[in-house]
Image (cartoon, rainbow, N blue to C red):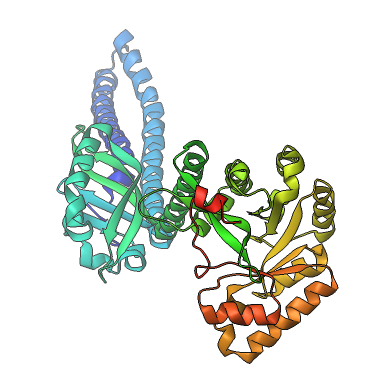
Amino acid sequence: MTDSHGVPMFSIRSAADGTRRALSSAIVVLTISSLLSLGHYLGDWYDVLAGGGTPKLHDWVALAGMLWLLVVAATVRRLMRVHRDLAETAQTATEAFHDAASSAQGWVWRIDTDYRYTYSNPAVEAMLGYRPDQIIGNRSIDLFFLPEDQAAIRTEVNASRVSNGWQNRESRMLHRDGSIRHVRSSATAVHDRDGRLIAYQGSTADITAEYIARTAAEAATAHQTGMRDRTVRALRDPAALQILFQPIHDLHTGRIAGYEALSRFAGTPYRTPDVWFAEAWQAGLGIDLELHAITLAVRQLELMPPTAYLSVNAAPQTILDDRFAALLTGLGPDAARIVVEVTEHAAVADYDTLAAAVQRLRRTGVRFAVDDTGAGYASMQHVLRLRPDVIKLDRGIVAGIDLDVARQALATAMVTFAASLGMSVVGEGIETAGELAALTQAGVRNGQGYFLGRPAPLTPAYENAA
């Protein structure tokens, strides 16, 4: 049963109705009993007074009974007042429920045991695109739930027959426009006076934004965990990381001046080293992975010609790490054969601290180079603030330099600038004879690139190349 607003009345008034029915019965019984008793008592006294006799004990009891009827009458009156108050309370509760359901931000609804809607507040339109009158009489499972979810929803609802409802159940619902809404619902089972299930009434909230945010956070966590797990495997598995060496040639003599250590990671699908290191930094293991790669590289110093140097890459954060200093110090005299190429994965917050660390490490014999010089503002800042021993020209300057007078002028200027500060210049990414000739003409002393030699493991052939 519903009121004039379509609000389900049974759930609101069921308890009040039972009490009112009991009161009504009590009032009727007391009233009838009192009237019958009063008639009987009056008859007894009429007989006494009409016959002129003397009242006996039962006549006096009857008189007392008539006086007691005044108490009964007062009780009946009080019961009638309680009956009226209950009716008013039930009506107030109904109106309050209607007001609350109509103004609630969430969707308030009621379904029967066949899952058909018997009530809905207006919030359903904002949430799912239907007016209340458009869903009344429709089965909730068929109207709103995705076909692939319906079997699971039926199973859950059937289970709720035993548990008397459900709390905070999340599911997907179809909006009238075909889009999917993520919702959270709670419901309470409604029973009649005999304990039979007759309906469910509950509320549903749209949690689509919350779901998207939560899913994104879970994905980010999974991604972070995946990055960390991959980096940890690279650190622990001896077969996960291989160090290759690209020769650095003296462009005037053609002999090998040194090698740059380059990381190559195993795994399918193949991922470039910059991806591996970027993930390691994101996972908080960037320093660990760089130190691991450098350690593997310096172990092969003994395979190089004694006159060749080894160039390794290190970010400013790695250079500041005490483990890096310990690694270089542990090399003893061989530290003088190491050139540390300063790379940059993040902005340098404190150049003074970094410059101080560079100066301390120079005491071991280590030299420093700035990688990718000319590629941007950051590399030039490194050159100006750290005063490296070597400047490595970026591939962006080297590529096509033999065909571009501006690049030639820039390379010549960089050589002059470096010489004035006691630095040497290395050209990176030399891939043609023309580029090699142009760099040599500009005064660049050393160079590397596929034209001169690809990265490869150290072999006896390399040992004799110097």
Residue 436 is drawn in which quadrant? bottom right
Given residues 123 and 30, the one toward you in this image is 123
The answer to whether residue 56 of the structure is visible from this angle is no
The answer to whether residue 61 of the structure is visible from this angle is yes
On screen, residue 216 versus residue 23, left or right, reads right
Position in image of residue 398 (x %, y %)? 59, 78
On screen, residue 206 versus residue 198, left or right, reads right
Residue located 56% across and 89% down the image: 403
Given residues 286 and 361, the one toward you in this image is 361
Position in image of residue 6 (x %, y %)? 27, 59
Residue 138 is drawn in which quadrant? bottom left
**Residue lying furthest top in this view?**
57
Position in image of residue 15 (x %, y %)? 32, 38
Numbered-mark total: 0
On screen, residue 319 versus residue 405, left or right, reads right
Position in image of residue 446 (x %, y %)? 66, 68
